Image (spheres, helix red, strand yellow):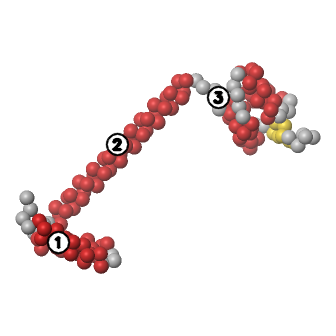
Amino acid sequence: MIKDFDVMKQQLRDLAGVLKDFKSEAVQLRVVELLFQRMGIESQDIEDRKGAAEKQKKDVLRKSKLGIKEKEKKTRAKRVSKGGRPGPGAIISQLIAEGFFKKPKLVQDIITHCQSKSGYSYKTSELSVGLVRAVRSKALQRRTNAQNQFEYFE
């Protein structure tokens, strides 16, 4: 294999100690390039090897990203195909379109209506986000009642 392997190993250890003394990575690289030039190894060979390694890293990264995107597409397709319950924002929009908010409603009224009419269960915290967004977009208005609870209406 390599002639005088133990000698070369010791020389590399000595070289590593010298290179560590230089604080700048650019200086360290320049010293290694000079050493390789003295040994007859072209810096172009080194650059070609670096370029090949970088290309290989990029290919692996690109393939892994493509794999992630494919997995995301599959999980999205599964979610859509199952036809689960509509999200809180969607159900609020649907109720607005149906005229549910002609009279002021509490969050608990909305939860009860969704449970009894469509069979969908929502938590107060889930619906409150959709309601606040509807208020901000001026699709709904709100006010506090005597019990200091918000009532939502058109």
Q: Which residue is mark 2?
A: 63
Left or right of 131 in this view: 38? left
Q: Residue at x 83, y 29 (%)?
A: 102
Determine contact: label 2, label 1, CB under 8 Å.
no
Residue 60 horizontal/vertical position (percent) = 32, 46
Between marks 2 and 1, how big is the CA–CA gap?
40 Å
Up the image or down, 29 lies above or below 58; here it is below
Mark 2 is surrounded, within 10 Å at the Cα level, by few (under 14), some (14 to 19) or many (20 or more) other residues, namely few
Q: Residue furthest front?
A: 6
State the mark number for residue 35.
Answer: none
Q: Residue at x 53, y 24 (%)?
A: 81
The residue tagged 1 is: 10
Labels 1, 3: front one: 1
Query: Where residue 147 sits: x, y (%)?
Result: 90, 40
Q: Amino acid at mark 3?
A: Pro
Q: Secondary structure at mark 3?
A: loop
User: Residue beneath label 3, please?
Assistant: 86
Work out which quarter of the rendered image holds the N terminus and state it: bottom left
Circle nearer the N terminus (1, 3): 1
Q: Nearer the viewer, residue 134 or 67?
A: 67
Whether residue 102 is visible: yes
Q: Earlier in the sequence, mark 2 or mark 1?
A: 1
Callout 2 secondary element: helix
Q: Give the position of the C terminus as an image quadrant.
A: top right
Q: Residue at x 27, y 50 (%)?
A: 56
Q: How many marks?
A: 3
- What x and y, as percent, mark residue 93? 71, 31
Label 2 or label 3, whichever comes before in sequence order: 2
